[in-house]
Image: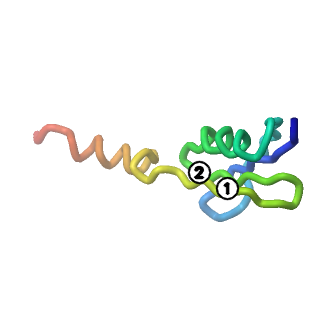
């Protein structure tokens, strides 16, 4: 098993949170990191080696969801 670090990247580009992952290989680590994506990007690293960046789906962010809900309200 290998050690990886997943970083939650804020809108300002700075690290908001670090999560340590233990995975069998790079592919498993990428899968796990991608599953962590919410409203912020996730960067996956192994020590000083950057493996991937996973961006949030713009249609699933809170801002868009809120806008869609407001647009789908029946007219008053």
Circles 2 and 1: CB distance less than 8 Å?
yes
Give me the residue at 77% from left, 60% from top.
50
Q: Quadrant of residue 48?
A: bottom right
Q: Residues within 10 Å of mark 1 (few under 14, many from 20)?
A: many
Give me the residue at 84% from left, 52% from top.
46
Q: Considering depth in this image, is 12 or 26 the residue closer to the camera? A: 26
Percent from the top left, x then y, of residue 19? 78, 41
First of labels 2, 1 by sequence position: 1
Q: Secondary structure at mark 2?
A: loop
Percent from the top left, x then y, of residue 35? 60, 38
Percent from the top left, x then y, of residue 28? 71, 39
Q: Considering depth in this image, is 47 or 75 the residue closer to the camera? A: 47
Relative vertical location of residue 3 with respect to residue 42 in this rendering, above or below: above
C-alpha separation, residue under disc 2 versus residue under disc 1: 6 Å
Q: Provide the residue designation for mark 2.
A: 40
Q: Quadrant of the C terminus?
A: top left
Q: Provide the residue designation for mark 1.
A: 9
Q: Residues within 10 Å of mark 2 (few under 14, many from 20)?
A: some
Percent from the top left, x then y, of residue 72? 21, 41
Q: Quadrant of residue 20?
A: top right
Give me the residue at 87% from left, 42% from top.
3
Q: Considering depth in this image, is 38 or 75 the residue closer to the camera? A: 38
Q: Quadrant of residue 9?
A: bottom right
Does 74 sit left or right of 60 as displayed? left
Find residue 60 and name its label.
none
Q: Secondary structure at mark 1?
A: strand
């Amino acid at each position: 098993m290998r050690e990886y670090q997943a970083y939650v990247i804020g809108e300002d580009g700075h690290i908001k949170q670090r999560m340590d992952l233990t995975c069998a290989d790079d592919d498993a680590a990428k899968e796990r990191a991608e599953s962590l994506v919410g409203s912020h990007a996730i960067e996956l690293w192994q020590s000083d080696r950057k493996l991937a960046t996973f961006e949030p789906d713009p249609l699933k962010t809170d801002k868009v969801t809120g806008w869609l809900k407001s647009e789908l309200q029946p007219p008053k």
